[in-house]
Amino acid sequence: MCGLIGFTGKTGTYANPSIIRKLMRANDKRGGHSTGFWNGNHFQKVIGKSKNLQLNGGLKAPMFIGHTRYATHGVINKKNQHPFKYGEVVGAHNGVVHNYREVGEKFGCKKTEVDSQMIFKVMNKTKLDFGILGKFSGALATLFSVGDGNFYTYRKTNPLWVGRDKNGGVYFSSLRDVMIKECKLTNVFKLKEGRLYVWNEGRVIEKIDIEHDPIESKYGSVRKQWWEYRQPKTYWTPQKGLYSGITDQYDDIDDIDITDYELTDHLDQLELFENSTRCECQNNSAELCWCSID
């Protein structure tokens, strides 16, 4: 379990510092061992929570990939903190990858200390074959860039929410309630599972369905959940507090059952499945509606 925070927008627009700080602070509850970000130009990584980051000079950039880490693989240090860079691929991941060693061997990549690193290492090795996302078993939610000016998002199992501000900037987070209640973002909903979204100028320009065909594990490793990975008591430990949904299983704010949604190209409205029947709105606002799939 970790936290993802992201931003992409139109040329000449930048992430709102207040919104980024609120998203980072909320996602601290998903991982406080270490924290980091990449803003399209440089990296910053620190031990501990996001309050240790120097964000003031790091947000004037066309995109932002932030991460709060709960360490499952690899020691707690700056080197093992997301985002990771391999060639032109820069990305962060939330989840636990069970077969990262097997996938690495399949594509000729040496073992990495952190399971997440293998996602982006293999992606670079295969010259941006996005289909490799379906070769990993476990839970994946990712934000990444490949040096082409686009912004990429993908999720399997783990949550990844999207919303936009009044200037058309698009934000991503592993937690939903902070996006609505504190950041006042609109059109907040969960990205469709198993689909890679390609963003440019604050819009979706391509949608790619990833075939889930994981490489079988030959090591017979125990498939642990995130809470089964223990760290020394001197480090941060997760506690359920203000923001519910700190675990991967829950996104239960307001007890609305949010399942799969389609993302429209213009992010102006929700394109629901044909059998979608129930919608609930906040403050009678059409922009703050969620519809469940029955």
Image (cartoon, rainbow, N blue to C red):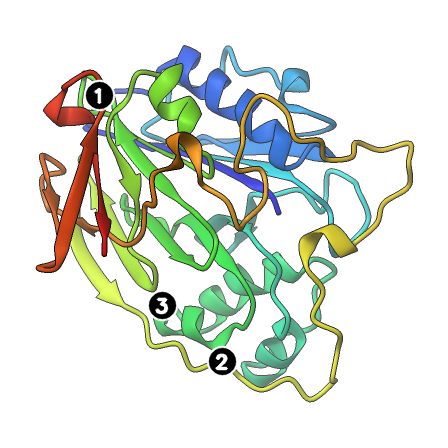
For label 2, the residue is 214
Residue occupying image coordinates x 44% and y 38%: 252
Q: Give the number of the mark in front: 1 or 2.
A: 2
Q: Quadrant of the C terminus?
A: bottom left
Residue flagged by tag 1: what amino acid is it?
Answer: Gly
- Residue 217: x, y in percent? 64, 84
| Mark 1 vs 2: CB contact within 8 A | no
For label 1, the residue is 12
- Residue 73 seen in the figure: yes
- Left or right: residue 282 compared with residue 242: left
Distance, label 1 to label 3, CA atoms, is: 28 Å
Residue flagged by tag 3: what amino acid is it?
Answer: Phe
- Residue 104: x, y in percent? 60, 76
Residue flagged by tag 2: what amino acid is it?
Answer: Pro
Of 251 and 92, the residue lying toward us: 251
Label whose residue precedes the other's in the sequence (1 or 2): 1
Residue occupying image coordinates x 61% and y 36%: 30
- Residue 117: x, y in percent? 61, 58
Residue occupying image coordinates x 65% and y 40%: 69
Label whose residue precedes the other's in the sequence (2 or 3): 3
Label 3, secondary structure: give it.
Answer: helix
For label 3, the residue is 130
Distance, label 1 to label 2, CA atoms, is: 40 Å
Of 158 and 104, the residue lying toward us: 158
Distance, label 2 to label 3, CA atoms, is: 13 Å
Label 1, secondary structure: give it.
Answer: loop
